[in-house]
Image (cartoon, rainbow, N blue to C red):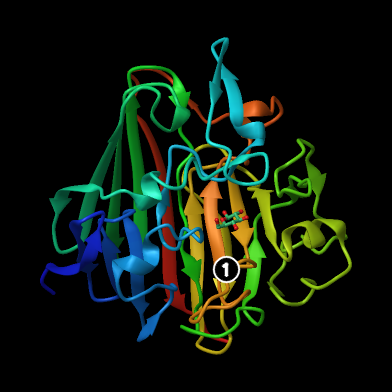
Amino acid sequence: MIATVKPFGKANGQETYLYTISNDILTAEICDFGATLIRLHFDGVNVVCGYDSVDRYILNDSYMGAIVLPNANRIRDARFTLNGQQYNLRVNNGPNNLHSSLPGGSAQSIWKVVNYSETELTLQLDYKDGELGFPGNRSFKVTYAVKGDRLSITYCRISDQDTVFNPTNHSYFNLNGHGTVLNHILQLNCSHTTPNDENSCPVGNIVEVEGTPFDFRYPKAIGRDIDEENQQLAYGKGYDHNWLIDDFDGSLILAGELYSPETGIALQTYTTMPGIQVYTANYLDNDKYHPRDAVCLETQFTPDAINLDNMVKPIIKAGKPAVHITEYRLYKKES
Ligand code: BGC
């Protein structure tokens, strides 16, 4: 396989490009706009939702395939205090901040490609102190790499001040390549969730999944309980919640597995981060995709953890490089 670069259309008057990385098992296509995973091919199926040119990604609030940082998910009332100082963010989701910013955030910026080979692509995005409302002159690097049957995503950051670092990849997975994911089987190594308020922001308590529609400790069809009468499911119009990964210790561990009996494709998610947001694309609705046509498996810190003292906080110290890793492993499962 040879590394290839193709134009992907103009954003903000500037050409964007699609970079292919591949090995014998996986082919990933990534755009420098949003450092977005546009396609991920395994066994003849594109297992992520995506569009054919960059215009569909501009000001698109589904964050499809994008890298979201410095902070994924919600921050209550769009503010937080760090080292005694209050920082105010853009209010862009009810009274809260969602995914750091729209427009102008990492998902809508053209990243600089700093390294590219057949199997690896590294993109960089820098923010000045105060940009997007967060402290520190910050340099972010994200590396996508195909390693055997895994797509590995490494997030690196260095800042000259203490700041927030809670990155994610916002891919919408569908292991059949199209249609509903309600028949996909999900298993999560997670015994606890963090319930939300009506704006899908965690209220700060931790509850056991046992006896609730949130129990995926044993493999279960995503659609089995999704329409149950349940306040949490009603708030999110389906699953749009954070689970805490059992045995989190900062090393790369298995968060769970998604499997489609139709294609026999299984996807395992490994991460160094403490949580996973499972989002069943409840707000995705356009000419190409509909609600529940995909599931996002967003590895991240607990939403609003920066304001919650009982959660692992996504704080990074000045001058200290920080790294988080997420890996998606694809394989064919015997049924
Ligand atoms: C959020 C959803 C939101 C989606 C797209 C997810 O991470 O939890 O509520 O609709 O991103 O922005």
Q: Is residue 312 visible?
A: no
Residue found at the far left of this picture: 2
Q: What percent of the width, then of the height, locates residue 229?
A: 89, 67
Q: Position of residue 41 (x, y in %)?
A: 34, 77
Is 56 positioned to the left or the right of 214 in the image?
Answer: left
Q: Residues within 10 Å of mark 1 (few under 14, many from 20)?
A: many
* Image quarter of residue 236: bottom right
Look at the image and tell me whether residue 256 can be seen.
yes
Q: Is the shortest distance between ligand 1 and the CB of mark 1 under 8 Å? A: no
Tell me the quadrant of the picture where the N terminus can be found. Answer: bottom left
- Indicate left or right for 20 with 183 as reference: left
Q: Residue at x 73, y 66 (%)?
A: 238
The residue pinned by badge 1 equals 295
Give above or below for 61 relative to 42. above
Q: Residue furthest top?
A: 84
Closest to the observer, 300 or 284: 284
**Image quadrant of residue 37?**
bottom left
Instruction: Please identify the quadrant where the C terminus is shown.
Output: bottom right
What percent of the width, then of the height, locates residue 247?
62, 43
Q: Does residue 161 lie above or below 14 as drawn?
A: above
Q: Amino acid at mark 1?
A: Val
Q: Nearer the viewer, residue 18 or 55?
A: 55
Does 36 appear above or below 140?
below
Q: Residue at x 14, y 55 (%)?
A: 116
**Is 148 on the left-hand or right-hand side of 309?**
left
SS label for mark 1:
strand
Residue drawn at the location 47% of the way across and 42% of the way down? 101
